[in-house]
Image (cartoon, rainbow, N blue to C red):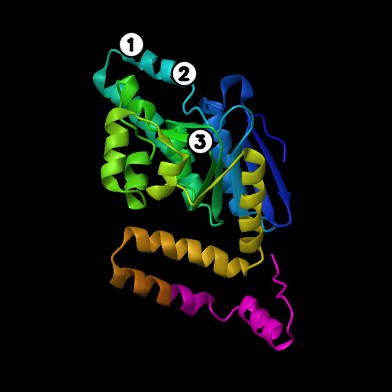
Amino acid sequence: MSHQFFKVSIQNKIATVSIHRPEKVNSLHHPAWMEMKKIFETLDKEPSARVIVLAGEGKLFCAGIDLELLMSVNELGKVTSSAHRSEQLYHLITELQACVNAIEQCSKPVLAAIHNGCIGGGVDIVAACDLRYCTEDAYFTIKEIDMGMVADLGTLQRLPRFVKPAVVTEMALTGRAVKAQEAVAIGLVNNVYENKELMMKGVEEVAFVIASKSPVAIRGTKAVLRHSRDNAVPDGLSFIAQWNAGRLLSDDLTESFKAVMEKRKPQYKD
């Protein structure tokens, strides 16, 4: 797959998506955000990809929103009509939110592999992923507070769901950096690796295990976990009952039983 601001490849049922704006330390301007959205929407429908690894090329994982984009937002201050100015800002914010939402809404599990800095919008991105791993030199900072603004692409909504809320509040109000070992302790990442090479190897091993499972069950598990996070337990139980009523009796279930009886690894269709 050829893209301008990302590198995308698929091998062994694993799609690897790498942010690639080295000259801008992987900060994202408007075209890059839109390209990211399109990539995840495409991979959502790509049968050969069962799991996605999201990484960053170059010096660091992601420096967040490109200043070019922020400057264009500042230009909206010249719009004389407050109503029109507010409408344009609302449209831009929700458009960028949709780019991050595409990661969460992708039916395939997304594993973030984070090295060095994960700043501002980078935190929004990894908060929308299903699993997160990082290197020993990694750090995470909700940088928007230092720019006189409130983080608005999902960090403040998603992070408290799996990170201690008091820590998220402190991060959001101070802009302080959370380093790798603390990130593990507070539940922000699953594991820490010595360097990027070892991290990518470790994350790919996790991705390979996931990709070996039933694609129907993988997608279903992600959907049910997301629904359970956002709804009460009775609603979650009703959702999984309806989900399995429609999908439990699948070819994957039959293949799983056959593999057990024949003492072999199951071979699932894409």
* Label 3 SS: loop
Is 87 placed above or below 100 here? above
Residue shown at 70% from the left, 75% from the top: 266
Per the image, the residue denoted by label 3 is 138
* Label 2 SS: helix
Q: Which mark is residue 14?
A: none
Q: How far from the left and from the top, in percent, is residue 142?
A: 37, 32
- Say which of marks 1 and 3 sits in front: 3
* Label 1 SS: helix
Answer with the quarter of the image where residue 255 lies.
bottom right
Quarter of the picture holding the C terminus: bottom right
Task: Determine the residue located farthest toward the bottom in the rendered image.
Answer: 261
In the shown orientation, is residue 212 left or right of residue 129?
Answer: right
- Disc 1 marks a residue whose amino acid type is Lys
The answer, for residue 95, to whether it is visible in the render is no
Q: Which residues are magenta?
A: 242-270
Per the image, the residue denoted by label 1 is 78
- Disc 2 marks a residue whose amino acid type is Leu
In the shown orientation, is residue 251 left or right of residue 66?
Answer: right
- Say which of marks 3 and 2 sits in front: 3
Q: CA distance from mark 3 to mark 2?
A: 22 Å
Residue shown at 73% from the left, 84% from the top: 263
